[in-house]
Amino acid sequence: MPYTLGYGTNGFTDHPLDVTLDVLAHEGYGAVALTLGHPHLDPFADDADAQVARLRGRLDDLGMRVVVETGTRFLLDPFRKHHPTFLDPDADLADLRVRFLCRAVEVAAGLRAECVSFFSGVLPAGTTAEQGWERLLARVPRVVAHARDHGVRLALEPEPGMLVETVADALRLREDVGAPDELGVTVDLGHCVVVEPDGVRGALLAAAPHLLNVQVDDMRPAAHEHLPFGDGELDLALALGTLGEIGYTGVAAVELPRHSYDAPGLAHRSMAAMTGAWAAWHQTTTGSASTPQEALR
């Protein structure tokens, strides 16, 4: 694979971060997607910078890549998950989101992370799509400028039900804010089953020039619910094969945020599913057999 398989810490919330890394290394993962906040790394903790420095050393020891994820559920509002967002009508509340993402950029710089992944938010009641878009155009550039100052790349993730819902929406926003080099796209393969009109292959082909981050999970068309591979309708071999075809070289990390109760087992089974899917795609496209072990080389 030209890219590196990883696993998200939001699927290991019952494990300390050091133990999570031990498990992932044991299962053969070469990357970790670090979700900032409880329980692994609070970016606003008094000793956050020291934690970042220590984690960078640990990642170096393990030879692991890292991306920073910001989909923490209740970090900014203990009563409403993922709030506030860029789209909040209250400018002071929206500023909390901006400041959080700017802090995520600083953490990413300290970790030498591949990128910081973020989302737009759900359109608030009483807000039109046009008003929401105007708020994005006013607020996202502040984070982009901070990322530029710190040498960090940002990856906007389309999310089902949010204002930026599809890859086309993400690419449109990128153009509308001036197509900055620092701003790319995250694609969640499972989301493609739910909202992408041209499916996972079409979404990846469209995102390819600006693809900075990939999340890997299964889904069913009718629900935005992250599922283990085989429990939904994602064509995993097609998805991973398309990533190889477009020359993606970043991190592709499993995202199962509601499955910490079986994290080690799912990490093991997910690795087997992904390497098996890659081998199947390789055999289909080249006509030569490839074992999962060979596919990882």
Image (tube, rainbow, N blue to C red):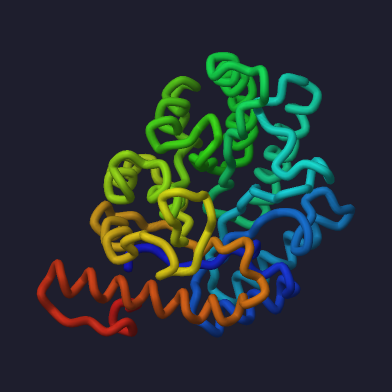
| Residue ranking furthest to the right | 46
Q: How many marks?
A: 0
The part of the image, by quadrant, that contains residue 285 is bottom left
Find residue 249 and report its horizontal and vertical position in percent. 37, 58
**Residue 295 in the image: above or below residue 137:** below
Q: For residue 109, say whether it is visible.
A: no
Say which of 287 and 74 sits in front.
74
Q: Residue at x 44, y 61 (%)?
A: 218
The part of the image, by quadrant, that contains residue 64 is bottom right
Q: Is residue 194 left or right of residue 241?
A: right
Q: Residue at x 48, y 36 (%)?
A: 165
| Residue ranking furthest to the front | 222
Find residue 31 and report its horizontal and vertical position in percent. 52, 67
Find residue 241 and report its horizontal and vertical position in percent. 27, 62
Q: Is residue 59 left or right of residue 186?
A: right
Q: For residue 124, say whether it is visible.
A: yes
Q: Is residue 171 left or right of residue 70?
A: left
Find residue 5 and report its horizontal and vertical position in percent. 45, 68
Q: Residue at x 62, y 61 (%)?
A: 257
Q: Residue at x 73, y 75 (%)?
A: 15
**Residue 294 in the image: above or below residue 170:** below
Q: Is residue 285 left or right of residue 172?
A: left
